[in-house]
Every structure is written in structure tokens, then in C-alpha cells.
Amino acid sequence: MENKTILVIEDNALNMKLIRVLIGIGNYQTIEAIDAETGIKLVREHQPDLILMDLQLPGMDGLTATRIIKEDPISKEIPIIALTSYAMEGDEEGAVEAGCAGYITKPIDTRSFLDTIARYFKHNVPNDDSLKETK
Ligand code: MN
């Protein structure tokens, strides 16, 4: 049973709904924010295990929010996956430069989504006993 918490910062209601369903299937807890300012506040309050960051947000953009989260000692170790738009060329490079561990391109591929997320958890917790085979 997974009890990891994922913070999703996404202003598009349909994308948020889809991500919520997928994360629920993966048995993770979801925390949601529809703008970067709220998202940064929730990072500090909840210390999530992973952050999904939309890059295009009202007010502060996702790259700026990523830099702020990565500069803060309390949150710098939390992996951030950027949610980038297929149409926005160059977003991926910008996301990695800002400190994102990787990116997921929208529209989201529902079949690979959970596998992709799981990979970033593993990078974060390389010594996690739950990953070892049990006899
Ligand atoms: Mn957006």
C-alpha cells in the first residue's frame, strides 16, 4: 500500500481531474493547487513526496515556482516533474534547467503516467526496502 503524497499544481480543471483519477488508481494521496503561490505554500506545509508542476499558470509561472521550491532547504530534495504542453517547444530544456527531475508532456498518456511517476520516486528513495524483492 502506497501512502506517498503527490502535490499537483495545475490550473486546467480537465487535466487536474484526469491526474486525480490516475493518482487515485496508484493509491497515492493527492494535494491540489491551481496556482503557483498556493502550491508553494502547500509544499512547505505538507512536504509532499513528489510535485507535478504545470508550467503555464496564472500569476507566477511554473518555472519560477520550481526555482523557489528548489532554493528552499526545506523542499529542495522533493522531485518535481514538469507538465509541459506538446506545442511548447523548448519547455523541457527550461524545466530541467529550473530544477525539474523530468517532464510529462500534455496531453497526458494515461497508460504510462503511473510508471513514469514511480520512476521518480525510486530516484528519491534509492534505499527504500519496499522496493526489494520479498522471499
Ligand atoms: Mn496551465
Image: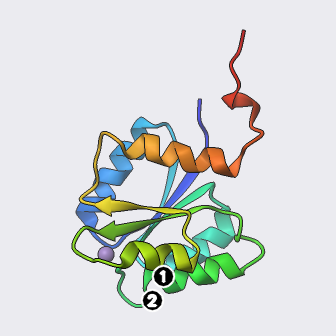
Q: Ligand 1 is in which quadrant of the figure?
A: bottom left
Q: How many marks?
A: 2
Q: Nearer the viewer, residue 82 or 37?
A: 82
**Residue 87's spot in the image, x, y percent?**
21, 73
Q: Mark 1 points at which residue?
A: 63
Compared with 74, 115 (above or below) is: above
Instruction: Give the secondary structure at mark 2.
Output: loop
Q: Is residue 33 visible?
A: yes
Q: Give the image quarter of residue 99.
A: bottom right
The residue shown at (34%, 69%) is 84
Mark number, residue 89: none
The residue shown at (33%, 73%) is 11
**Which is closer to the viewer, label 1 or label 2?**
1
Q: Name the residue under label 2.
A: 60
Instruction: Give the secondary structure at mark 1.
Output: helix
Horizontal side, residue 134 vs residue 102: left or right: right
Q: Which residue in the rendered view is the most extreme toward the bottom? A: 59
Compared with 62, 49 (above or below) is: above
